[in-house]
Amino acid sequence: MSALSIQLKKPMYYAVFYVLFAVMMGIAAVYQPLISMLGLGVFFLCMYAIYQPEKMSYLVLLSTAVSINYIVEANVPGLEILSLYKLGILILLVPCMLQNGLRLKFIYPIAAIAGMLFLTFFFSEWHPRLTLSITLKAFIGLALPFFFLMIKWNKESAQKHIRIICLLPLVSVGVGAILQLAHLYAFLNVEFTGAIRVQGANIAPHLAMLAFLGITVALIETKRNPLHAKFYYCTLAANFAILIATGTRGPILAMLAMAAYYFFDMVRQYIKGKLILLIPLICSLALISGAVYVQWDNMTKRSFERQTGTGIDLSGRTEAWNYFLKGVKDSPLAGRGLGAVTVANDGSLYSGFVVPHNEYIRFYYDAGYIGCILLFLSLLVLFRMIYRVIPQRIKVYYAAFILAFFLYSLSDNTLSTIQFIIPFCWYLNGLYILSTTNSKKEDVI
């Protein structure tokens, strides 16, 4: 076993979980019977996670297809539903971590976020509404997805995870349709501009994130794993239709470079004699043309309905970015404290701007130039480590995928939204595992 791995014997974590949940349920039963019942449900889930850790990982990944904080309205004092969800999935995946081990050489992003926490305590100019609990909650919430990046899955599980990621938008749409039929959640969202957006079991921007990953991952996988190209082409087409139906512009613009190289590569191979590629090429062009025709009115309403100083309606982003940049101008080096951005909106902005919808501004506000550079430098190191081991035939696709991530981060909360960052980290982990364990053979399930 590598010196950089963590692995414990089963009896040890069995005992830990039995004692931990017995204590938690006992305390909860005294103060709140309902919480005790929920705790009992979590206990049984944890038992399932202990005995079937791989299958539990599939359920956890599938759960990201639902924006639970919008579907479920419930809070425990001092802890909102989203924080409970994050804590829950961490607990459920602990057995996976203990059984499979952790790849600690991928710890750089977590170390960078810890560095931002250090800056917060010793150098940042704390925002007046920032508290210690908000800072610690922000640290845990931001660091958590990168633990999933380090789990050393076996090859079969990693391949199944990748397939699940491609299916997440379809799962969201299916669950959303069921919730609509049950009158529990609206399948469509109609904006004040008149634009109609599909949101499934999410909000439209979150569903767009799932679709973005479903498309870009499928593009890479058609080249990395050609034996299963049919599956990935089908999910790619479905996810593109879903992305267009969300009416979200940011992910479409972010993946333009990747899409351009995809078409270039297809045409190049077709010219070299791979005539079979004419079918997906024609289908792709037909799908894009149809999408433009169907969604042109929606996109026009969202982009030009309101007159703005930029000429294009960015849904309030320009005003929000200026607001947050102004708020941190007196503390540019270490920012206003990790998590400060979540309490910075004093009501001057639309309530939807809890964060700036720009990850560079968000982390600049929280940790200044030092923290922001530290975080994104750690991500570059991580991306390079994966780039070095992947097959040559997908290196350009992977580089375009990472470029799309950085571009998408200009207009949305890629690092702090569960629907993006957890599947994103999960895919990077799976790609690394499949590239290092069997680089010369095709993956099979």
Image: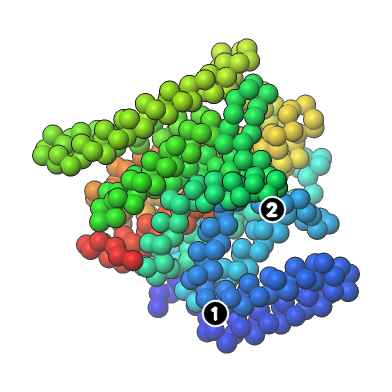
What x and y, as percent, mark residue 40? Answer: 73, 74
Q: What residue do we see at 56% from left, 62% from top?
A: 60
Foreground disc of the pair 1, 2: 1
Q: Which residue is mark 1?
A: 51
Left or right, 6 with reference to 163: right
Percent across and percent down for residue 97 are 52, 71
**How is colour applied across the structure in the image?**
rainbow
* C-alpha distance separating marks 1 and 2: 26 Å
Q: Nearer the viewer, residue 26 or 372?
A: 26
Examine the rendering and report whether any part of residue 304 can be seen.
Answer: yes
- Looking at the picture, which amino acid does disc 2 mark? Leu
Indicate which disc residue 82 carries.
2
The tag earlier along the polypeptide, 1 or 2, is: 1
- Where is residue 420? Give x, y as percent: 53, 47
Q: Is residue 14 above or below residue 271?
A: below
Vertical side of 227 occupied by 236: above or below? above
Secondary structure beneath dot 2 equals: helix
Side of 114 where 136 appears, left or right: right
| Left or right position of 15 against 160 | right
Q: Residue furthest front?
A: 181
Q: Is residue 397 left or right of residue 105?
A: left
> Which residue appears at 25% of the width and 61% of the height?
442
